[in-house]
Image (cartoon, rainbow, N blue to C red):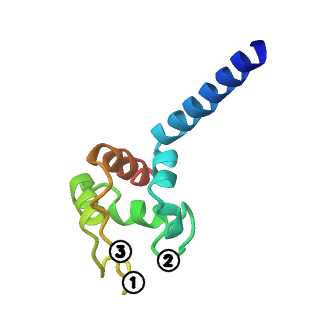
Amino acid sequence: MKTFGIALTLSALVILSGEALAATPQGLLQQHNCPACHAVDHKVVGPAYKEVAAKYRGQKVLAKVMDKVKKGGSGSFGAIPMPANPQVPDADLKTMVQWILTQ
């Protein structure tokens, strides 16, 4: 019975640590598969987060960038279009974009 209790406790810790990771901006980016196209400091398919932050530095663009991520588009950083991401909850999107704009 003691082994079962330990296993249950460890399972709960793994679940909670996954939830804690997802609650961070980097965890949310991972959860929503952003690293498939973006990285912090180099171009993957789309621009680096640092490039996005540099382009918009000093501007009040949170809503604009959130809208761009949600609806997708092209032309801001080259010819490769960014697909729409309507499945990303607005709260997650806001957390991620705020973090990206600080890079």
Q: Cβ–Cβ below 8 Å for labels 1 and 3?
A: yes
Amino acid type, callout 3: Met
Amino acid type, callout 1: Ile
Q: Which of the two discs, 3 and 2, labels the residue nearer the N terminus? A: 2
In space, the residues marked 3 and 2 are separated at their CA atoms by 9 Å
Please report the residue visible at 51 percent of the width from the left and 48 percent of the height from the top: 26
Residue placed under numbered mark 3 in the picture: 82
Residue 24: x and y in percent read 48, 40
Name the disc covering residue 92, or none. Answer: none
* Frontmost residue, 12 versus 97: 12
Q: Find numbered disc 1 in the image and state the secondary structure of the residue it sits on.
A: loop
Seen in the image, is 26 located left or right of residue 95?
right
In space, the residues marked 1 and 2 are separated at their CA atoms by 8 Å
Please report the residue visible at 53 percent of the width from the left and 63 percent of the height from the top: 35
- Image vertical order of residue 94 relative to residue 41, above or below: above
Seen in the image, is 9 located left or right of residue 85?
right
Please report the residue visible at 31 percent of the width from the left and 76 percent of the height from the top: 76
Location of residue 79 by image quarter? bottom left
- Image vertical order of residue 62 relative to residue 23, above or below: below
Location of residue 42 by image quarter? bottom right
Residue placed under numbered mark 1 in the picture: 80
Q: Cβ–Cβ below 8 Å for labels 1 and 2?
A: yes
Please report the residue visible at 64 percent of the width from the left and 29 percent of the height from the top: 11
